[in-house]
Amino acid sequence: MMPLFSADPTEAAFARFRAGDFAGAEQDFRNILAREPGQPDALHGMACLARARGQDATAIALVGRALQNNGISPDRKARMHITLGLALIAQGHAEAGRAALNVAVILQPSDPRAYAALGEAFERLGRRGEARAALEKAVAFSADDSFVRTRLGALFLDDGLAEQAVGQFRRVVNRRPQDGGALANLGAALFACNAFDEAATVLSQACERGARTAETLNSLGLVEMALGDLRAACETLREALQLRPSDGRIANSLGTVLMEIGRLEEAEALFGAIVRRESGEEADRARFNRATILLGQGQFAEGWRDFESRRSLLRLASDVPQWDGLAGEEPVAVVGEQGLGDEVQFLRFLTQAAKRRPLRLRFRAAVLAALMPELDQGRILSAEGPVAVEVSLLSLPAVLGMNDVPSTKPYLAVAEKPEPGRIGVCWSGNPSYRFDRRRSVPVRCLDALRQVSDVRFVALQRGDVPEWMERVSLETPVDLAREVGRCAFVISVDTLVAHMAGALGRPLWLLNREGGDWRWKDVDWYADVRQFRPPSGAAVAAGWEAVLREVAEALSSREWSPESL
């Protein structure tokens, strides 16, 4: 009669374990150990069972006993070291786990499981580049690499390497086109790459194929927001929040859309609930979002306080102590953190700051400080040199206690004078901004301005400039200031050029997206601003076409003439 089991009876036990029959596998392993105490493969099997049940300390002890046997083949020993390494990691001993897994790799240099586990150890140790390299080796040796590619894609995405993440997730989708989870991962990575049209398609497919989860809907809602379909985004994010009511990230996403469509009380209530319920990043994000509502309404005392939460979100840590606003003669370093438009808007606060302490300006728009007539230039020191403390330019209102409505008086001045009929135009911002599609005007929409006679349109940006516009040199912020100074007025989207026009006191026609930024709400930061907005709910391109027709009609109206500018 043929034997029921092969020469290695542990194979049947491991087969039961892999099939999920833990009770049967345990009985098999115990039977082996009863016949042969200390049998290393059976001890390893019991360790695997312990790990599956969350008993990692027991797993470590069992593998340790198994490895005391000197007759174990390299491939079996490698598998034991994988189990040991994963158990050590689970117990919080990541470096010891890495060492055990490194032995597994040496013993079996083509085993994808060893590299995948080693990637987990490196990730726990914060050695993310090495974690990605280990997972890439696991992919190279795997027959079915979908699981490892998914992990690798997630690492790429978390590390801000969205294009690499898309590559990994796309391969998983190609292998498993009906897998809703794989499609959801790809859609999230496409969103991070600003590939919004494809992301919308892929995420919709994910929902259709079994992954209509809170996570997928959150990604889809953000994509719809980026595409300008704010009402659809609102409904999608509401559904996501219903599926996961306590998720601060989804609540923040929904609150942001509610702000954009003008439902501020509902948005503020969401943000307040997050702050009361949570701590950490999502609470900071909610405080920052709430700050934009408060600042837009002119509630500066509370608004500037909450606005400081952006420092945690941006991880603006520094070894230099932060300035508390106290006066003295030890220099303060003023540093930048965000876009040039933000810097130009907040330059105005340098005048008050310099009255309290000498300043060393260490941000990109610092060269414009020389154009501030009310700033005591003697208090502006060389950027290099010792400082006692530092402060972010955007933190100056909070540090200085600036709780009143800001003055709309111009604070930059150039020698250039406005030239009648010279109109500066800026139609796009930084394309890397996630919601730039809603902010920037498609260049073809500018054709509506060509009907306006007796004016000169000057491009106040570089790139794809229409042939009928004048081009000027814009190498530095001072170049831009001088060119804006020569304009009778400026037409601009919400970007650096708009703030430069306001700071110089030039009339500004702001092409503002639906919803718009807090800087253009109820409080006037600049003296002469007229806003043009797309019709509510309009598609992005159609909305901007309507805006540019309105601007062209306003320029062509009899109430306006080149001499009046």
Image (cartoon, rainbow, N blue to C red):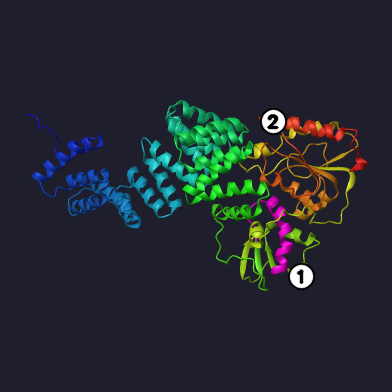
The answer to whether the residues at label 1 and label 2 have Cβ atoms under 8 Å apart is no
Q: Position of residue 69 (x, y in %)?
A: 17, 53
Q: Which mark is residue 541?
A: 2
Q: Characterize the local packing of mark 2: few (<14), some (14-19) or many (20 or more) Cα atoms within 10 angstroms.
A: some
Give the camera-side residue of 195 and 533.
533
Is residue 340 on the magenta stretch?
yes
Which quadrant is home to the N terminus? Answer: top left
Determine the residue located farthest toward the right in the rendered image. Answer: 563
Give the residue number, with chain letter if any, for mark 1.
378
* Residue 53 placement: quadrant: top left
* Position in image of residue 177 (x %, y %): 44, 28
- Residue 505 is left or right of residue 246, and the answer is right
Chain-order first, disc 1 or disc 2: 1
Left or right: 222 as drawn, with respect to 17: right
Which residue is at the far left? Answer: 1
Residue 177 can be seen, yes or no? yes
User: Does the rendering let one see residue 381?
Assistant: no
Q: Most prominent secondary structure in the magenta stretch?
A: helix
Q: Residue at x 42, y 39 (%)?
A: 150
Magenta highlight on residue 92? no
For badge 2, the amino acid type reads Ala
The C terminus appears in which quarter of the rendering?
A: top right
Q: Which residues are magenta?
A: 335-358
Which secondary structure lies at badge 2?
A: helix
Depth check, front residue: 372 or 529: 529
Residue 131 % position (x, y): 42, 49
